[in-house]
């Protein structure tokens, strides 16, 4: 009876469970990255494509912030829900899921207000080019005024993953991605009777795809997720639950938001050298997401597995979660590095860039991908830290990866070592330095937590 109550989260061998949950999540995240690449490829082929790509790069930090808050809230919900399910406290688990929906409503309202009142002020801090400014404002305003898709999908995705329904969350992700890819050329170029909308079309295709993913995930939550009770009474906000969600999830929000801050800061540093450097970095960032998002998918399997094991009080399931999580993450990133080294030229060629921008993008792909193995270790251990409620350790890793080392080193490179386009590619070594040093810090933090908390468990 006890095995039936615990389900596969508490009984399946962790090595198998991580693959069982992780592979659908990895496919889901890689497909999300793929449609980001395809989106940029379609935008690149429109009139004024390179300026449009630059505009999307400027808008990207706010999109990342939107994702950061949605996913970070989802991570808190995921860990807390997995913990309550591991402890077999069904009523408390239902209240966690209900409060997640309430938080999604609040987050959506905040970004809608920013979309109406804040977009122009934000974009003006990064460019004085009027064409790029108008494109960036148009694209970002549409994404912010209709944020419900990405916010609620991030939450319902984690509700499904927390109880082991990773296949359903993957189907929801794929559904939206396919819709986005189909609508991109139709709405950007004006096909099949649709008016030609350019970057506005790319934005509308994106938000429609996100809404489709949300609706599919919602349907699965209501029909397949039998482990969690539903009802409007559970949506009533409770301060204790919300505080606990953000005690766990706030470091994840900061971790994701730091990606936004880093990209914003890097854009400002690079544009002081040349706009071509900004465009090259923006495209590289979307290309590398295809690999980095894979390890993010694995992290989303590591977190509930370790958290559920923690709720059970099982040292063996926690240590297996850490061991196999790190091994699988490093293997994924080794494969990713090899793929990008081989495919750098054809991947960059698909965007039709000018000579110098294409060269900078190719060098970015080849140089920065060397840092992937370190990044894999860092991301996997962040998932472990979140699962164990060690938000401070997760936050420290995020700060080191995306702020403490990246921006100062990039600024030094562009100001004193490579201040012109001739040697500008040297700035890409920033990311190898940052991820490498952070990997050492992550390993030391994990050793400390293991000795203090995990080793002492029965």
Image (cartoon, grey):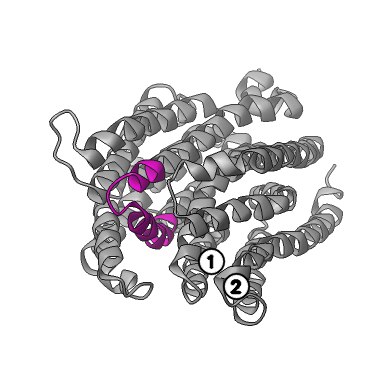
- Label drawn at residue 377: none
Image marks 1 and 2: residues in contact by CB distance under 8 Å? yes
Residue pictured at 63% horizontal, 75% vertical: 418
- Residue farthest toward the front in the current orientation of the protein: 355
Q: Position of residue 326 (x, y in %)?
A: 76, 42
Which residue bears the numbered disc 2? Answer: 407
The one of 416 and 146 positioned closer to us in this rendering: 416
The one of 89 and 456 positioned closer to us in this rendering: 456
Q: Position of residue 331 (x, y in %)?
A: 75, 37
**Secondary structure mostly seen in the magenta stretch:** helix
The one of 232 and 351 positioned closer to us in this rendering: 351
Residue 313 appears in the figure:
no
Residue pictured at 48% horizontal, 49% vertical: 71
Which residue bears the numbered disc 1? Answer: 262
Instruction: Tell me: 79 left or right of 74.
Output: right
- Quarter of the view holding residue 427: bottom right
The residue segment tinted magenta is 39-64
């Amino acid at each position: 009876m006890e095995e039936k109550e615990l389900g596969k989260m508490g009984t399946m061998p962790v090595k198998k469970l991580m693959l069982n949950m992780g592979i659908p999540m990895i496919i889901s995240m890689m497909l999300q990255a793929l449609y980001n690449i395809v989106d940029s490829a379609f935008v690149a082929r429109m009139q004024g494509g390179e300026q449009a790509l630059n505009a999307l790069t400027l808008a990207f930090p706010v999109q990342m912030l939107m994702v950061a808050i949605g996913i970070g809230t989802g991570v808190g919900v995921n860990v807390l829900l997995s913990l309550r399910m591991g402890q077999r406290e069904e009523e408390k688990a239902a209240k966690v899921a209900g409060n997640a929906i309430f938080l999604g409503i609040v987050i959506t309202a905040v970004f809608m207000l920013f979309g109406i009142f804040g977009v122009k002020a934000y974009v003006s801090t990064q460019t004085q080019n009027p064409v790029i400014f108008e494109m960036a404002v148009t694209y970002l305003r549409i994404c912010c005024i209709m944020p419900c898709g990405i916010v609620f999908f991030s939450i319902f995705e984690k509700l499904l993953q927390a109880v082991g329904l990773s296949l359903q969350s993957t189907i929801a992700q794929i559904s939206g991605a396919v819709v986005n890819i189909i609508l991109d050329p139709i709405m950007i170029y004006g096909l099949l009777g649709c008016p030609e909308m350019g970057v506005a079309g790319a934005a509308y295709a994106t938000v429609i795809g996100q809404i489709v993913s949300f609706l599919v995930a919602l349907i699965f939550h209501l029909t397949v997720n039998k482990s969690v009770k539903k009802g409007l009474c559970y949506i009533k906000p409770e301060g204790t639950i919300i505080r606990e969600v953000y005690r766990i999830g706030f470091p994840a929000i900061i971790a994701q938001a730091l990606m936004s801050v880093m990209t914003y800061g890097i854009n400002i540093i690079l544009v002081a050298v040349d706009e071509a450097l900004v465009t090259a970095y923006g495209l590289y960032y979307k290309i590398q997401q295809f690999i980095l998002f894979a390890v993010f998918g694995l992290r989303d399997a590591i977190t509930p597995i370790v958290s559920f094991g923690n709720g059970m009080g099982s040292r063996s399931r926690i240590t297996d979660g850490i061991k196999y999580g790190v091994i699988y993450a490093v293997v994924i990133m080794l494969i990713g590095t090899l793929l990008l080294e081989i495919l750098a030229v054809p991947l960059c060629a698909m965007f039709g860039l000018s000579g110098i921008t294409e060269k900078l993008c190719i060098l970015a792909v080849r140089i920065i991908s060397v840092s992937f193995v370190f990044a894999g270790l860092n991301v996997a251990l962040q998932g472990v830290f979140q699962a164990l409620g060690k938000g401070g350790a997760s936050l420290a890793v995020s700060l080191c990866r995306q702020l403490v080392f990246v921006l100062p080193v990039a600024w030094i490179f562009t100001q004193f070592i490579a201040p012109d386009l001739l040697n500008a590619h040297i700035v890409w070594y920033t990311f190898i330095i940052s991820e490498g040093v952070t990997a050492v810090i992550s390993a030391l933090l994990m050793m400390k937590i293991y000795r203090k908390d995990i080793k002492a468990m029965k």
